[in-house]
Image (tube, rainbow, N blue to C red):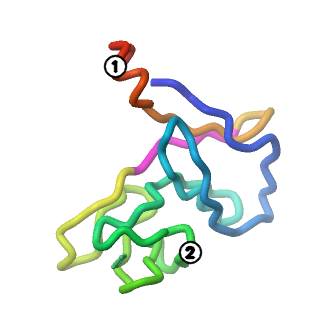
Amino acid sequence: MPWYKVDDHFNAEHTGIEKIKVAGKSICLVQLQREVYALSAICPHAGADLSKGWCTNGQLTCPYHRYAYDLTTGRGAAGQNDYINTYAVEVREDGVYVEVNSWLDKIKGLV
Ligand code: FES
């Protein structure tokens, strides 16, 4: 699967949620100091922008109806019976990378 560079710099002191577009996908890049997570930015409940949400207890919470998703697995909180896609993240010397299958890669048979 291809890796995409999404940031030139990694600041270990930074905490925040940023929406990025990678390979046609809207992704939330969540940084909690030294930990970085990449999750779908579209809430499966009613389509809200999860990058406008907030993080508590290892979960990303949707700003509309407060459904919550595990930052590591994407699994919805108890009783929700849903999930969001998660993506692998690597912090390298030259920046932050996210691993994403693009629709074009799938069509080409590369993945
Ligand atoms: S749209 Fe996200 S919880 Fe309803």
Q: Is residue 35 above or below residue 76?
A: above
Examine the image and state in which quarter residue 65 appears.
Answer: bottom left
| Badge number at residue 50 | none
Based on the picture, tell me whether residue 87 belongs to the magenta stretch: yes
Q: Secondary structure at mark 2?
A: helix
Distance between the Cα atoms at labels 2 and 1?
Answer: 32 Å
Residue at 68%, 41% (x, y): give it: 6
| Badge number at residue 52 | 2
* Majority secondary structure in the magenta region: strand
First along the sequence among labels 2 and 1:
2
Front position among marks 2 and 1: 1
Q: Quadrant of ligand 1?
A: bottom left
Residue labelled with disc 1: 107
Residue 16: % across, % down: 68, 68
- Would residue 39 appear left or right of 15 to someone viewing this image? left
Examine the image and state in which quarter residue 12 appears.
Answer: bottom right
Residue at 37%, 67% (x, y): give it: 43
